[in-house]
Image (cartoon, helix red, strand yellow):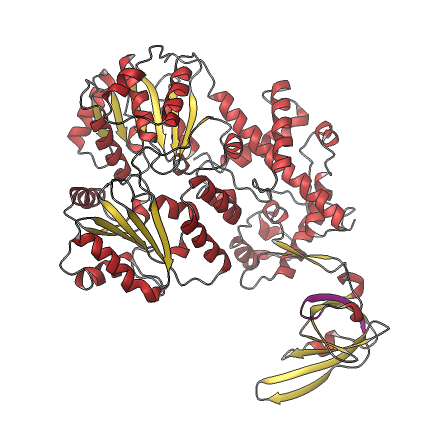
């Protein structure tokens, strides 16, 4: 392989500006691609490959498709001025059997680049004529270097794919690379050495070697992910002082004005059995929008309180925390369980009093935001903690709440459904309970997609529901005016609708940049029915529970991910009335159109999550990178399931034999895992 004999002078941690051919200016451009070190560049894999190794003769070319043809230039390039601003350049090439005409537009450099008598690899669409063929503006390279699999990289202004390719190969030639996977592991799973794998990703020698390289790199990435998550789980498996032996589930169920679903009963039973043990429960409660996760949590809080333990629930936003607080007050209104709300906007004097009651044990259950994990918040006897919408918290934030007690039991709630097998891998630091049925009385939500020409008709349908005494939402992707003028902002739309189409109705505005007390006031008015129509951004995505809200219009629906659209839609259909969601979009993009069709065809959150994962990949699916799941550069958890199983087996075996991964053989792997998880822990 090229470059392997050169002296290695750089480390993967070396700043990219010190790589030959980069410097300060190029480093700034590379930073836009997320490349800051030499290692970042080496692991910046092509987004696609252009296989120039499989050439065809001119006679074999398929009309209308991109063909790769090896041919020699058989006449000088000629220049023809067609009109002002348009010059075409022509030549002929031959593969030894047939001629092909080449045409280039406004490319004066082609005269010097194509030399008569020399062979090149041409790639482009072919038109077949009676005795010849034509190719317009093909890409080309000299034959000795062009007949290969070409990488295609993401690019940025001033830095094209070819430039990135050249820099990546320079980095491989200059950088000291140590294979951090133990030789025994590489042998057991037939894995290519690291440097060979990286080189065959950037400059594949053959299709077979490329596939072998890709498998090696997917394996290492998924292995590190699984070892890291398994080690997190083992850290959470210390002995707990918070043993909760008494089962008061039946007492709680008797307080409810409704019957729990079988899925809810099963989840409560699984948690209660965990909480009886001396190892703290660490369980993910996963359920679709409206599946009744809060009722399960309430049963467990009741059980903890009756056993003499305090509980705490942390929500990502004040709106959601307030919603939970009101819900739990209703659950416990006929009990002696004392519930308190603690958020950033709680008045100072009230905060102090709440903190005193938490420390004394007078308060049984605290609901709040990040305010709960402040240093001066202490509990007298914290035995059970809950985090809601866990992907919105860093791992350290989740851990910080647990540190308020002595290894308390933990329940993590998420309305982002993912396939069970995938959840077991991604959340391998947690056990799993799934709510896979909806409570009785939940209404099916009819969903339609229309273009902007039918917007007024959609608004008319909203108005019909408001006249009947119902309430509704109109959701926008932007808060205020921006250069993205084609998008309707919440501010603009609120003003336009309240002064125009919905004049005479009570219209409210809600968005994330409002102060907490302003949000609270708007939501209270909406919950009371004083606001009939709420124009909002995605701040309503989780936690808003207004049974009388039955109609939702989502503007520029193509701007949202599938799971986010599903979360938004879940704000309606929560009462006895039929509900409708209308998606407004003029999108022509194939992926966007498919996404909207999926929304209209199913209300099954697990099917929607599958589609979302396929379209966006796990990193984007779980939100920004600090939300607890490391960024995967090459592995795809939806398609690489065979490697997932292999790496799970390998990780379990390694940790069983060497839990701390001690020894020189594992030093590199330890460092890489720590590096991978350091990025997402805060």
**How many marks can you see?**
0
Q: Position of residue 44 (x, y in %)?
A: 60, 49
Q: Position of residue 302 (x, y in %)?
A: 28, 19
Observer-nearest of 421 and 445: 445
- Residue 603 visible somewhere in the drawing: yes
Q: Is 428 drawn above or below residue 280 in the view shown?
A: below
Residue at the extreme right: 96
Q: Residue at x 33, y 62 (%)?
A: 482
Residue at the extreme top: 245
Q: Position of residue 253 (x, y in %)?
A: 28, 20
Q: Residue at x 20, y 17 (%)?
A: 362
Q: Position of residue 655 (x, y in %)?
A: 60, 22
Q: Main secondary structure of the magenta part?
A: strand
Tell whether position 69 is magenta.
yes
Residue 442's image quarter? top left
Q: Is residue 259 left or right of residue 180?
A: left
Q: Is 666 drawn above or below residue 550 in the view shown?
A: above
Q: Is residue 5 left or right of residue 379?
A: right
Q: Residue at x 43, y 49 (%)?
A: 601
Q: Is 218 drawn above or below residue 538 in the view shown?
A: above
Residue 494's image quarter? bottom left
- Residue 507 visible somewhere in the drawing: no
Residue 215's image quarter? top right
Q: Residue at x 68, y 32 (%)?
A: 181
Q: Quadrant of the C terminus?
A: top left
Observer-nearest of 380 and 320: 320
Q: Is residue 375 left or right of residue 619?
A: left
The part of the chain drawn in magenta is 63-72
Observer-nearest of 438 and 120: 438
Tell whether position 594 is magenta.
no
Observer-nearest of 269 and 426: 269
């Amino acid at each position: 392989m090229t470059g392997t004999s050169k002296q290695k002078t750089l480390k993967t941690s070396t700043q990219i500006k010190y790589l030959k051919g980069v410097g300060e200016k190029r480093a700034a451009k590379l930073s836009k691609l997320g490349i800051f070190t030499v290692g970042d560049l080496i692991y910046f894999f092509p987004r696609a490959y252009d296989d120039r190794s499989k050439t065809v003769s001119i006679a074999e070319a398929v009309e209308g498709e991109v063909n790769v043809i090896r041919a020699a230039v058989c006449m000088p390039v000629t220049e023809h001025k067609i009109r002002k601003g348009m010059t075409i350049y022509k030549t002929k090439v031959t593969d030894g059997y047939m001629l092909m005409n080449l045409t280039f537009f406004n490319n004066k450099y082609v005269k010097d680049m194509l030399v008569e008598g020399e062979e090149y690899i041409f790639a482009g669409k072919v038109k077949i004529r009676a005795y010849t063929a034509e190719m317009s503006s093909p890409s080309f390279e000299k034959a000795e270097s062009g007949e290969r699999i070409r990488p295609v990289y993401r690019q940025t202004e001033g830095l094209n794919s070819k430039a990135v390719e050249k820099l990546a190969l320079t980095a491989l030639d200059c950088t000291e690379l140590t294979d951090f996977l133990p030789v025994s592991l590489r042998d057991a799973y037939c894995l290519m050495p690291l440097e060979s794998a990286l080189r065959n990703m950037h400059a594949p020698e053959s299709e077979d070697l490329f596939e072998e390289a890709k498998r090696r790199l997917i394996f290492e990435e998924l292995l590190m992910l699984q070892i890291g998550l398994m080690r997190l789980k083992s850290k959470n498996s210390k002995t707990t002082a918070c043993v909760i032996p008494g089962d008061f589930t039946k007492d709680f169920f008797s307080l409810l004005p409704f019957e729990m679903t079988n899925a809810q009963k099963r989840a409560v039973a699984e948690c209660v059995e965990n909480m009886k043990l001396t190892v703290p429960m660490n369980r993910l409660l996963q359920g679709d929008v409206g599946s009744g996760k809060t009722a399960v949590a309430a049963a467990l809080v009741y059980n903890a309180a009756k056993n003499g333990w305090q509980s705490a629930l942390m929500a990502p936003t004040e709106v959601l925390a307030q919603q939970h607080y009101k819900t739990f007050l209703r659950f416990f209104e006929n009990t002696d369980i004392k519930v308190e709300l603690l958020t950033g906007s709680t008045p100072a004097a009230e905060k102090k009093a709440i903190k005193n009651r938490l420390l004394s044990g007078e308060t049984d259950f605290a609901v709040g935001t990040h305010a709960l994990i402040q240093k001066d918040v202490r509990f007298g006897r914290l035995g059970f903690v809950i985090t809601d919408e866990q992907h919105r918290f860093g791992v350290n934030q989740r851990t910080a709440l647990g540190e308020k007690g002595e290894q308390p039991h933990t329940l993590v709630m998420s309305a982002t459904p993912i396939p069970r097998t995938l959840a077991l891998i991604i959340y391998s630091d947690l056990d799993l309970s799934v709510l896979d049925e909806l409570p009785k009385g939940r209404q099916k939500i009819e969903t339609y997609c229309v273009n902007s020409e039918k917007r007024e008709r959609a608004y008319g349908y909203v108005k019909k529901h408001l006249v009947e005494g119902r309430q509704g939402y109109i959701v926008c992707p932007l808060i205020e005016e921006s250069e993205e003028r084609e998008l309707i902002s919440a501010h603009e739309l609120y003003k336009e609708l309240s002064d125009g189409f919905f004049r005479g109705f009570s219209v409210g505005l809600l968005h994330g940049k409002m102060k907490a007390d302003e949000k609270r006031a708007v939501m209270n008015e909406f919950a009371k029915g004083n606001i009939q129509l709420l124009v909002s951004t995605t701040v309503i995505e989780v936690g808003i529970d207004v049974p009388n809200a039955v109609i939702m219009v989502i503007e520029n629906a193509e701007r949202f991910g599938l799971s986010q659209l599903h979360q938004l839609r879940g704000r309606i259909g929560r009462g006895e009335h039929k509900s409708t969601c209308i998606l407004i979009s003029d999108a022509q993009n194939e992926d966007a159109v498919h996404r909207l069709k999926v929304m209209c065809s199913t209300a099954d959150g697990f099917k929607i999550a599958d589609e979302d994962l396929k379209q966006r990949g796990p990193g984007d699916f779980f939100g920004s990178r600090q939300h607890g799941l490391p960024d995967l550069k090459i592995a795809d958890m939806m398609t690489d399931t065979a490697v997932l199983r292999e790496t799970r087996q390998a990780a379990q075996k390694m940790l069983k034999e060497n839990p701390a991964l001690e020894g020189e053989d594992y030093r590199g792997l330890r460092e890489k895992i720590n590096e991978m998880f350091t990025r997402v822990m805060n």
